[in-house]
Amino acid sequence: MVAPSLVPRKPGDRVKTDRRDALKLARSHRSDDLTAVWVPDEDSESLRDLVRAREAAKQDQLRARHRLTKFLLRTGRRPPGGVKAWTEGYAEWLQQIHYTQPAQEATLLDCMNEVQHMGYRVKRLEEVIVEVVKLAPAPVQEVIRGLQALRGVAHISAVTIAAELGNITSRFESARKLMGCSGSFPSEDSSGKRIRKGGITKAGNAHLRRIVVESAWSYRHRPAIGAKLRRRQEGVPAEITEIAWKAQNRLHRRYMKLMAAGKDQRKTMTAIGRELLGFIWAIGIKAEAVCTLQLAA
């Protein structure tokens, strides 16, 4: 299977027939100009659909929360000082809000019910993901377990990455190939002595790019192994935990260096996320190799 959008095409070619298409594909295949794409199997595709359904639910939850907070701001209702949004104290404050106008009271009630419904929806999907992963193939479970050794990659994030990548060993020859798959490389238009680079290409998997950039924010802090991370690393091979520790040291140094150079923080986190993919590739390759050895034994 090849990517139709990446099949070479002449700008002046205005005639399209089956015969011409077959000849063009044959010539492109002979010159190695066709880009192969990965076709997920039934298990991988079903897990990916579930993970993306949870991601859509999180986006709906965010929109519902925004509608509620914008309504409160528009009517002059602000939480007291020291109360952070969407904490238990914030929920208690919401229960104390009342309006004299029946229409506003009904609007507030509808917004609060929507936020609560979205919360239940996200929680239900996360519980289903936990149960479905237990039935996944052994290599997928091993990759998910190994990815959780990384800082900022908990269970849901690890499942999302594993579902989007599929079989890492067969799909990506190197870490650079994986980085390119995420579309997080900067665009470039250079010629001769002129070098011009722009924003990231975004020509890749947006779901993968989002989750790795989100995880990259954890590397702002100094390298450390907290209680939650230590529990996630229990039972993980020592080789994988060493990779995860190298990731903490390298990515934190990279973050400090870029910020000291005056780079924008959002661009810095995108660069950290791109390098994080390299460690994800290394852990995925190692985890799949460990699983292969275990099955062979």
Image (cartoon, rainbow, N blue to C red):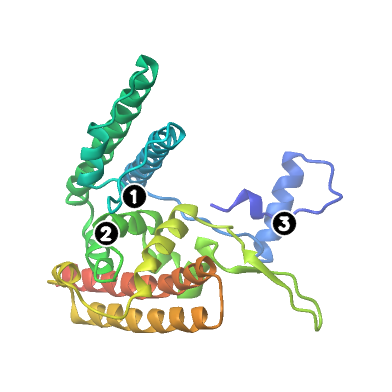
| Residue 44 tag number | 1
Give the mark nearer the N terminus: 3 vs 1: 3
Q: Residues within 10 Å of mark 2 (few under 14, many from 20)?
A: many
Where is residue 197, by image quadrant? bottom right
Q: Residue at x 33, y 58 (%)?
A: 162
At x 34%, y 26%, the residue is: 108
Question: Which of these two is toward me, 65 or 32?
Answer: 65
Q: CA distance from mark 1 to mark 2?
A: 9 Å
Left or right: where 18 falls relative to 84 = right
Q: Are marks 1 and 2 in contact (CB under 8 Å)?
A: yes
Of the pair 42 and 97, the residue shown nearer to us: 97
> Which element type, helix, strand or loop, lies under badge 2?
helix
Q: Nearer the viewer, residue 219 or 76?
A: 76
The amino acid sitting under disc 3 is Pro
Q: Which residue is mark 3?
A: 8
Where does the image place residue 136, in percent across and percent down from the top left? Answer: 22, 52
Label at residue 59: none
Badge 1 marks a residue whose secondary structure is helix
Disc 3 vs disc 2: Cβ atoms closer than 8 Å?
Answer: no
Q: Amino acid at mark 2?
A: Val
Specify the quadrant of the image occupied by residue 148: bottom left
Q: Earlier in the sequence, mark 3 or mark 2?
A: 3
Q: Label 1 crowding class (10 Å Cα cut-off): few <14, some 14-19, many 20+?
A: some
List the residue tagged with mark 2. Answer: 140
Q: Nearer the viewer, residue 254 or 113?
A: 113
* Mark 3 to mark 2 CA distance (whole Å): 35 Å
The reply to whether residue 62 is in sight is yes
Quadrant for the C terminus in the image? bottom left
Q: Where is residue 170 drawn, in percent x and y?
A: 41, 66
Question: What residue is at 54 percent from the left and 57 percent from the top?
Answer: 204
| Badge count | 3
